[in-house]
Image: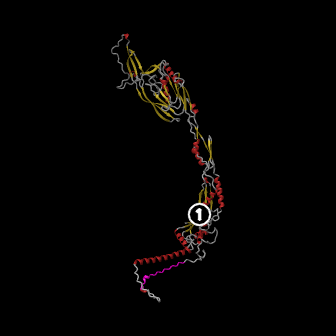
Amino acid sequence: MKIFGSSSSKGKRQSAPRSGSRAEPAHSVPEHRAPENRAPDNREPARVYASAHAYDTDAVPLRHMHQENPPGKTPKAAKPAKKPVTGAKKFVRVASIILLVLLVCAAGVAAGFGYYVNNVDTIFPNVSVEGFDLSGLTFQEATDRLIAHGYEANADNISATIVFPEGVKFSVTAVELGLSRNAREAATVAFSVGRGGSIIDKSIAYAQALLEPTEINYLNSAHIDDSIIRTRVSEYTNAFNSTIHESELEINSSEITFVKGSAFQYAVESDVFDLMMFTLQRAIEENAHLTANYMPTASTGEVINLASILAEVHVEPISSEFVYEVIENGDDDSERTLVMGGTESVIGRTFDLEEAEQKLDAAVNGEKIVIPIVDLYPKFTQEQIDDMILRDTLGELTTNIGGNANRLHNITLASNKINGTILLPGEEFSFNSIVGQRTRANGFRDAGGFIGGRLTDVVGGGICQVSSTIYATLLQTAIFGEDILITERTPHSLTISYLPDGRDASIVWGNRNFRFRNMFDFPIKIETIVDGRYMNVRIIGSQVNDYVIEVETVPIRTIEFYTLERESDEVPYGERVLWTPGQRGEVVETFQRLYNADGELISRTLVARDTYNRQDRVTHIGTHVPEDTGYVAEPGSPSVGPQDPTGGAPPPEGETPPPGGEAPGEEEAQG
């Protein structure tokens, strides 16, 4: 049990003289005490009287009980004798007598205990004042003990602190309020524990004291000057209220400006005062330093929600896209007019939400915060699209033109037909469709071309150099499968001299074509120009990537040619004619190696695996004899068979070289 006492306590609290008074305890001091420290007791001690009479008439025989008859009366007849008492009845009577005796003894003990309690002149058992045990001490002994242990200086341990949000706080101590501890008054409160009421009440209180300790916290607070508290409360309430600000927000094209508002409304001074008084009273009772948090009413003003502001401010950029319009000028596609340009673009805007939240969290109430709005540029603006259309040279290659004037003429004619061709995104280039059939009526001449594995004159001979140079330029310009999709391409049957193996594209009207599709997001333009003995191909488009392509040719296998001699009735008898000079065949693989701007290899991709046939070295030996000469070959003329005068390999065992070394299945190649 704890008792909190002060000289201003009311209700059930024990009362005591004011601090500093040396008067003897009045009503709280026990009435019965030693002459030096208690008032005389004028009351009579309670007395308990107890008697018990028991008569057992049945135990006396009738013959011993007699009485003389009064004069003038006839004696009554004698009553018959009672029956003897049984054993059970006798036990009950004895037990009743014992119980009655015990009750009488208990009453005597209780009366004696009550007398003792009523007259004890020391503090009840298990009573202490703020940790100082005063059990069994007289009033004066308890006072002396408290003073000896520095009890009257313990007010230094008492204070109350109020904490506002935003770090504002203040404290009030018992010392600055003039509160003190008085050992004599505390001893008076301790002495009064359990002494109120009747003897029975006191006896019960004493018995309870034996079982339950009583702790007393006592401080003289009769004359607290609350003006100190009110002044302090007013000062710090105003200090807190000065931190209260309303939120402010302003958004323009370049920045967001806002003032951080408070999360609370103004503090109410009377509420702060009440909280301080309540906390101070508890601190007095508990002899402690106590802290209480004052929480004002939450603000009902606008709260800055950065996520909502971002949703309002943020604009996604929209990139311009290439668009075109085709205006047909006739039935011929070559007469079309293209109107090309970019769609309207949008520059977006946003701000860094994470940075804004960090600034807001770090700001104090009322602080002005500025968050920059940044532009989000699209991948391409409309101006950029308009400017980059067919602006950049994506790739360029020049090859040397050999052969006679007719071959140069054919190459120039085909180049002029292709030059300036524009392929829109997704459109396909077709060599045969653009150049047309190679006929003399279309201006083509006879020049060298492959027929049956042998170079001979054909109409339009030499134009394969145009298709091959375009293909070789694309190889080093665009990523195959992404930027350019080759839809048809066939290598020559034999290796050619003007390009490395694996980089050519043969064409034959009605048989072979060279076709590819523009997979760029922009149009490309093919320029094919002949200047003297040089043919130049340029691929013009829009350079949007910074990668570099390197073409790699890997030889896989070499096919040796054979040296052969064959009889021919087309050659005059006795003459030897070199029909085909002979050249090796090759199997090669062609790769595109892709590098980034830093020169780092990104990928190595196989483009094609090409096989070029061998061309055997064949000499025709003449067997033709004109009929009008009458010449007859002499018997024993030398036979004609395979020879190897130039180092060509003989045919492998079991393999017969094709006549004339011609490539099987090849009809014509205009290369």
Dot 1 crowding, Cα within 10 Å, few <14, some 14–19, many 20+: many
Percent coordinates x, y for residue 418 in the rendering: 51, 24
Pick whichever, 477 or 647, lies toward us. Answer: 477
Q: Is residue 8 left or right of residue 634?
A: right
Pick whichever, 408 or 640, lies toward us. Answer: 408
Q: Quadrant of residue 614?
A: top left
Q: Is residue 302 above or below residue 210?
A: above
Tag 1 secondary structure: helix
Give the image's coloring scheme: secondary structure
Q: Can the viewer see residue 290 in this picture?
A: yes
Q: Which residues are magenta?
A: 47-62
Residue topped by disc 1: 285
Percent coordinates x, y for residue 585 in the rendering: 42, 26
Quarter of the image with the N terminus in it: bottom right
Magenta part, dominant SS: loop
Q: Which residue type does callout 1 highlight?
A: Glu
Q: Is residue 525 above or below residue 110?
A: above
Percent coordinates x, y for residue 86 in the rendering: 40, 79
Q: Quadrant of residue 563?
A: top left
Q: Is residue 184 left or right of residue 596?
A: right
Queried whether the magenta region covers residue 436, the answer comes back as no
Pick whichever, 413 or 177, lies toward us. Answer: 177
Q: Can the viewer see residue 534 in this picture?
A: no
